[in-house]
Amino acid sequence: MLSLIKGIWTVLKHSIRKRETILYPEEKPNLYPRWRGRIILSRDPDGEERCVACYLCAAACPVDCIALQATQDEHGRRYPEFFRINFSRCIFCGFCEEACPTYAIQLTNDFEMGEYYRHNFVYEKDHLLISGPGKYPGYNFYRVAGVSVGGKDKGEAENEEPPVDIHSLMP
Amino acid sequence: MNEPERSIIILYLILVGVLLTAAGLIWLERRLLGLWQDRYGPNRAGRFGSLQVAADMIKIFTKEDWIPPFADKPVFVIAPAIIVVTTLLSFAIIPFAPGIEIVNLNIGLLFFLAMSSLSVYSVALAGWASDNKYSLLGGLRAAAQMLGYEVFMGLALAGVIMLAGSFNLREIVEAQRKVWFFIPQFPGLIIFVIAGLAETRRIPFDLPEAENELIAGFHTEYSGMKFGMFFVGEYMGVTLISALIATLFFGGWLGPLLPPLCWMIIKTFVFICGFILVRASLPRLRYDQLLSFGWKLMLPLALLNVVATGAIILAAS
């Protein structure tokens, strides 16, 4: 019986507590840097698309909401011909960002994506592609990757050893 | 103004007042529950969400009012009306202030007890007519619970009746001029509050509609305004029991400075908030606990209270 009264008293004390609710549209919630919101495609510092259309994000996606088609430019640099994310399926798990070898696909702090029509949730490449490098400002995949592309040969990347001469017997 | 006109005006004022209070309680309860759970509750429609009631009303009136094909139609329709009618009838005997009451019955309390006994038909018939096992279980539980709690509710009031020497609510209030009855009748007050909670089927005694075991109990099959009648009936019941606690134990309209009607309204309002506070804090009982609590603890206590009050009155005279 005493415990009942104690319980009621505890609840009554909450009358003067601060309320936990964040009154959303007027008051914005505090989002942390690693918040997983709207997905974007970033560019490297030279302004080129980072995405190399490796399909790893599409493979990692548990709900299959990413669709893309790889193609190449005249220098042999791969890029997606189209890149499509269906946000009505996306669960914002961030696996695509983890899978991406070039930091191209990134999840941002934006979550206000409400739409009146379901088909408006399908974002094409020009909706996804932003003009900056996103969370990794200095990173340029082709500058550090050991692949030859567009006037840069093997071994010319930053911190890269010259290619091994496979015909030499020297250690 | 002559007498019949005056009483008709009072009748309509009380009717409208009670219905508005019951509607407003829907909002008040949600706001208070929010306050005690550190959140806001409805705060979008109107100032502090006060238009929520209007929104709820529009919704509930325009909703499809569906009667299941397997239900016993006439009984199904009449069941929700019974609870509203009996609760509204009970308000007839409550003196809100000197002269502001609908009838001055000299068996007022008996009339209230009769009406609250009748209201069990509403719930039991609703559960029966729905032809749904969950509804039936809810109705059965309601019937057993009401029977158990009705008994000691009457006995809890016996002490008050002995002290006041009358069943007439106006005379009971007048008898509290010297001391409000919650002091000499404290056990009676506790027992009456518990019985009142059970009568209105509120948490912790809401077993007839326990949603995690019986979906919604006796009103599972109800929708639209028929459900609304049960809903409003419950809030009117809360208002009624609060008004009765104020009248029987806390001196009704008596109080310094403010006009009598103000005191009555303030007291009733405080007890309504108390009901909501109990709902915010206590969990639901188990069914067998509920019944054994009623029959094995509260009934003997109520009887003891009657015997002790009687002995003290005898000794004093």
Image: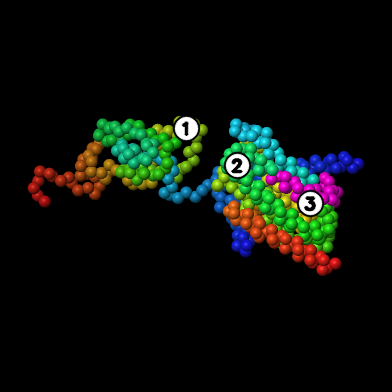
The colour style of the image is rainbow
The numbered mark 1 sits on a residue in which chain? A
Q: Amino acid at mark 2?
A: Ser
Q: Amino acid at mark 3?
A: Leu
Residue B286 on the magenta span: no
Residue B104 on the magenta span: yes
Q: Residue at x 42, y 45 (%)?
A: A36
State the image coordinates of residue A144 (x, y, percent, origin top left): 26, 45
Task: State how far apart marks 1 and 3 are (Cα).
Answer: 61 Å
Q: Amino acid at mark 1?
A: Arg
According to the picture, the residue beneath numbered tag 3 turns out to be B109
Image disc number at residue A76: none
Q: Nearer the viewer, residue B192 or B124?
A: B124
Task: State how far apart marks 2 and 1 are (Cα).
Answer: 39 Å
Bounds of the magenta span? B93-120
According to the picture, the residue beneath numbered tag 2 turns out to be B135
Q: Between disc 2 and disc 3, whose residue precedes?
A: 3
State the image coordinates of residue B271 (x, y, percent, origin top left): 71, 54
In the image, which is nearer the foreground, mark 2 or mark 1? 2
Q: Where on the picture, by quarter, is residue B50? A: top right
According to the picture, the residue beneath numbered tag 1 turns out to be A118
Where is the N terminus of chain A found, in terms of image quarters?
Answer: bottom right
Under circle 2, the secondary element is helix
Q: Can see residue B299? A: yes
Q: For the residues labelled 2 and 3, say whether their Cβ atoms are less than 8 Å apart.
A: no
Under circle 3, the secondary element is helix
Q: Is residue B115 left or right of residue A8?
A: right
Q: Nearer the viewer, residue B315 or B1?
A: B315
Above/below status of B101 relative to B70: below
State the image coordinates of residue B162 (x, y, percent, origin top left): 81, 59
Q: Can see residue B281? A: no
